[in-house]
Image: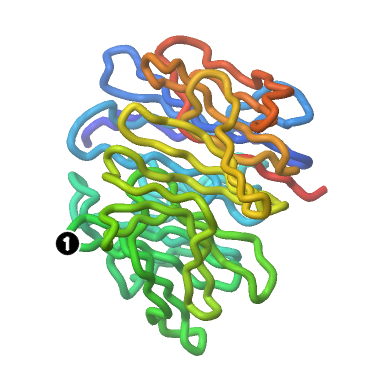
Amino acid sequence: MPSDPYGPIVTHALGPLHGDQLLWTQEQVEKGNTTIRVDLLVLPLAGGTPQIAVSYRKSAGGIGLEPQNAIARQLSPDGRRIVLHTPKGIVLIDLETGSQRILAAGVLPVWRVGETIAYFKPISEATYGGGDIWLVDTSGHERQFPAQGAPLAWTGDGFLMIGRLEPNDRLTPVLYGQALGQFWKPFASFTGSISPGGDNVAPLGTKPGTPNFIAAMALTDTRGENGHIDVISLIGRTTQDVGPSVTGSFVDLRLEEPRLNSVGQILYQRNGAGVREIHIYDPNARTDTKATVTGLATRAEWSIDGDQIVYLSADPRDGQATTVRMIRPISGRDDRELYRVPDTSTRLTDVATLRYSP
């Protein structure tokens, strides 16, 4: 039998999780430059020592490079388990006990409320440009979803937002629901496409009658190419522009990774040629403020209480994130470093925050 170039997936039992926790991923190029070690770390925001929850290896090159994991959408609703895509497949890991099991062969898993995970199964291991959506439960039972594209996000009541791949390589947002709990059918399709790059659709923890998603959208119309932040609602099957917008080539400038806090403020990124900024938009005051950060913020999420942001900070000269920081983004107060990578071969790739029930 051929040897395994990646070795085992190593987990560490964290024990009972409670309070506000910070989770992030880091990647270290290993000796020989053929493999990368990926670690998922967890840190209580009240203070403490970071703990490595999961470690695995992946290829450092080749045509079949897998996409990055996106922690927030891969956590179970209670945050005590996570699904990660690895060279061995999609792996279910219990963060508290350290137990693990391989569920399926695929990438881009998205966890629904309950025990169902949607994921993408590429047609070829060498490309992620085409493939099918599948569903798998935590026992490993799989079934194919009746659509091609990429799974993006679930609503709390079980509708799945997918990105339907168009001939121009853009993703059109389409909502699917189950008729009579058995058959998946398209429920609504929306004008425009999801902005290229980034994790650009986020579910909203909403009350009945309020929007279900916030998304960075791209549209080509009489104005040419333009980008904007929308909220998407099941009721009425509508998108509503909530404020931030740009006009011009998506290469020059685009909006990405919108996140909503508890008082309605929108955290988002303005990225493009020579531009990478974090902004805070307040729909009530109609103000758009460039956030104060240290270095170059490559990823950002709201803190649990919504008055600070947690972000990955990079040196602007190379764009490689090396510290996890927290700050009040408008005033610039209380800026503090929470973690720094151990050496120059390591970079940070994603961050998330979560409040655990007692």
Position above or below: 201 against 347: below
Q: Quadrant of residue 2?
A: top left
Within-10-Å neighbours for mark 1: few <14, some 14–19, many 20+: few
Relative placement, left or right, of 322 versus 272 is: right
The outermost residue toward the bottom is 180
Position above or below: 86 against 144: above
Q: Compare residues 124 and 257 and report the one nearer the observer.
A: 257
Colouring scheme applied when the structure was drawn: rainbow
| Residue 81, position as x, y percentages in the image | 60, 49
| Residue 338, position as x, y percentages in the image | 65, 21
Position above or below: 115 against 79: below
Q: Amino acid at mark 1?
A: Pro
Relative placement, left or right, of 34 versus 294 is: left
Quadrant that contains the N terminus:
top left
**Could you tell me which residue is drawn at 42 percent across and 80 percent down?**
187
Is label 1 in a helix, a strand or a loop? loop
Relative placement, left or right, of 227 versus 206 is: left
Look at mark 1 in the image and give the residue it sits on: 167
Task: Evaluate whether residue 81 shows in this view.
Answer: no
Task: Evaluate whether residue 208 shows in this view.
Answer: yes
Q: Compare residues 347 and 126 and report the one nearer the observer.
A: 347
**Could you tell me which residue is drawn at 62 percent across and 53 percent down?**
283
| Residue 80, position as x, y percentages in the image | 65, 48
Relative placement, left or right, of 22 versus 84 is: right
**Could you tell me which residue is drawn at 32 percent across and 75 percent down?**
146
The outermost residue toward the right is 358
Q: How many marks?
A: 1
| Residue 193, position as x, y percentages in the image | 33, 60
Q: Quadrant of residue 151?
A: bottom left
